[in-house]
Image: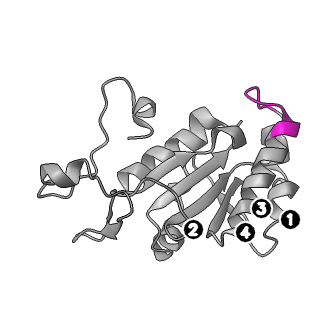
Amino acid sequence: CHLSGLAGKGARVNREPAGGLDPEKRYPRNYDETRFNTTGAFEMINAIPNSANTALMFLDLQEEIMKNSRTVSIDRLTRTAGALAKLAVLHQLPTFLSSVGQGGTFLGSVTSQAPDIKPRDRIQTTAFSDAGLVAAIKGTNRPVLILSGVASEIVVQRTALDALAAGYAVHIAVDACG
């Protein structure tokens, strides 16, 4: 699990279907295989992002929130998140923006790359509290999520844990997080 440290020391995120997995499927050797299991959740077999299996989510990259980032400078965060958004457009990755109403304007280096994508407002500390967003992500049929955002210890972490619980393989773009 890429984010096992986020779940707490000794915690284990269970992604196995109810019947469990046989030992060969628990640690697959073929990382190019992804699929839904019988309950409709993704079986995490492929954790390597590619243009066919990956969606991208930007979280709270907004003026009023970014100014409180102490992890990386605002200039660096602006450049790296913008570069990630540009890659998403070039590779035709479904991209989602999640924001909070009081956070201000979403980062221009992200929105300029995909001006048709509008931020979805939420009131909780996880993007997975937005049922419409969760349905839209599931509708992409892409089991790998890349997350970028501010308040890594709160919003990015909670969204990552909820995505893992929903069966997604999650990658954090740490260079594009604050």
Residue that label 4 marks: 89
Q: Is residue 110 above or below residue 74?
A: below
Give the magenta range.
Answer: 68-76
Q: Report whether 54 appears left or right of 58.
A: left
Three-letter code for the amino acid on which mark 1 is drawn: Ser
Q: Earlier in the sequence, mark 2 or mark 1?
A: 2
Q: Considering the whole magenta stretch, tell me its main secondary structure.
A: loop
**Residue positioned 85% across, 45% down in the render:** 63
- Disc number lying in front (3 or 1): 3
Residue that label 1 marks: 112
Q: Quadrant of the N terminus?
A: top left
- SS state under label 3: helix
Please state the horizontal and vertical placement of residue 70, each as a whole percent of the image: 76, 26
In the figure, residue 41 lies in which quadrant?
Answer: bottom left
Q: How is the image coloured?
A: one colour
Structural distance between the alpha carbons of marks 2 and 3: 13 Å
In this rendering, does residue 102 appear at all? no
Q: Are marks 3 and 4 in contact (CB under 8 Å)?
A: yes
Three-letter code for the amino acid on which mark 3 is drawn: Lys
Three-letter code for the amino acid on which mark 4 is drawn: Val
Q: Is residue 157 above or below residue 136?
A: above
Q: Earlier in the sequence, mark 2 or mark 3?
A: 2
Q: Earlier in the sequence, mark 1 or mark 4?
A: 4
Residue that label 2 marks: 51
Structural distance between the alpha carbons of marks 3 and 1: 9 Å
Q: Report whether 19 appears left or right of 158.
A: left
Structural distance between the alpha carbons of marks 4 and 2: 10 Å
- Disc number lying in front (1 or 4): 4
